[in-house]
Amino acid sequence: MTRRPDIFRPSRRVCGTTPLSQRGLSLIELMVAMAIGLVMLATLASLYASNSKTHNEFSKTSAQVENGRFAIQSIEQDVAQSGFYGRASLVASSPSYIDPDPCATAKTLLGFSASPTLTLPNGVVGMVYGAAVPSCLSSYNVAPNSEILIVRYASGDASASVDTTNYFLQLSQCSQDLAPLAFDTAASAFTLQTLACNGTKAEIRKYVERIYFLSTCDTCTPNSDNIPTLKVAELSNGALVVSSLVQGIQDIHYSYGIDRDQNGSPDCYVDDPTIDNTANCGTISPTYSWVNPVTNWYNVTAVRVSVLARNVDPTVGWTDTRSYSIGRTVVDGGAVADGPYNDTYKRHVYTTLARVWNTGGLREMQ
């Protein structure tokens, strides 16, 4: 008998025992999957929130650092140029110096005169902590007890065209000229010559005067934003024009280096050059007299600038319990340091030393 191939053998598997493929999830499996997904989603959301918060705080800190840097750099650059009135030497003319009213805008009140003697305004003058606010700034929300710095100089650009609204300055380099200086708004007033005395006109430079002060707001009207701001009033077109320079500057302090022995280097730093600082600076030989404030300002050869910069936006969960020293030696409400403010703004102090090169540098070369 021939054996049939296995292919024709009947199946021996019992009906109903064949394994079935999975056709869905049980309720328990579904709940476990959802729980895992929710945990992952919560983790990602927490990570995103943490990264966003870190990014926001980093942006706030970066802006604060940049604001502090820009504030002290702007002041440092202006102090470095202060007292520059042209490339001609005025030493032989033995000029006298005065401190004009910072609010003055008329030509005869700005401190320049060629007769009967040569007179120039001091390049650096300050209004110390607690001083009265100049009348021209009274409507600009000046911060209480704000220290004010005034700088004056001739522009480094000697190619500017003379107009009839701004003040310009020309120094004579020619011994044949009848006047050592011309200060005016009219082009016809500038006839002084170069060293060759051949009719070639000496350089004409625009006069620059800036007043740095703190305001309690950047945008002050119609509603104040309450952002402390460093502002500058600049003499332009015959008037003082105020503009915001840097937001977030809450306090500023200037310490003035006084050169008592005329060698160009500051001998001591004082907060108020208008008073007798013998107790702070000691005595030298020959004795230095603090009697004349104008002379004291003329002898300023360096300015130490310290600013307290604040974040523009608050930080949730932060309380500023710190105190900040910006070098002020007078008593501010019973404390030398600023703070603690006990608010939600982060702060930092930035400091630089600005040299008055056009005073100290000339003395060092003598």
Image (cartoon, rainbow, N blue to C red):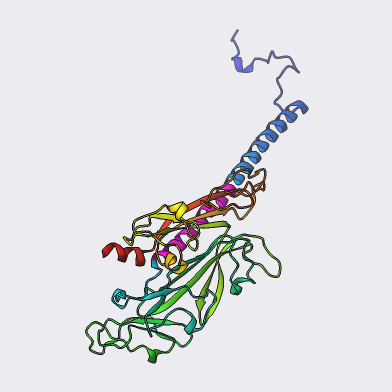
For residue 154, side relative to residue 29 (left or right): left
Q: Where is residue 113, by image quadrant?
A: bottom left
Q: Is residue 279 placed above or below 88 in the rendered structure?
A: above
Please provide percent x and percent y for residue 213: 55, 65
Please provide percent x and percent y for residue 310: 58, 53
Q: Where is residue 223, by image quadrant?
A: bottom right
Q: Residue furthest right?
A: 27
Q: Quadrant of the N terminus?
A: top right
* Viewer-nearest residue: 3 or 180: 180
Q: Residue at x 61, y 45 (%)?
A: 53
Q: Which residues are magenta?
A: 55-80
Please provide percent x and percent y for residue 51: 59, 43
Q: Is residue 267 placed above or below 4 in the rendered structure?
A: below
Q: Residue at x 43, y 61 (%)?
A: 76
Q: Residue at x 48, y 85 (%)?
A: 165
For residue 361, side relative to residue 318 (left or right): left
Residue 200 magenta-highlighted: no
Q: Quadrant of the C terminus?
A: bottom left
In this rendering, does residue 7 appear at all? yes
Q: Residue at x 44, y 86 (%)?
A: 185
Please provide percent x and percent y for residue 160: 38, 81
Main secondary-structure element of the magenta-colored stretch: helix
Q: Is residue 78 placed above or below 46 in the rendered structure?
A: below
In this rendering, does residue 24 appear at all? no
Residue 70 magenta-highlighted: yes
Q: Residue furthest top?
A: 1
For residue 27, side relative to residue 147 (left or right): right
Q: Is residue 12 placed above or below 316 in the rendered structure?
A: above
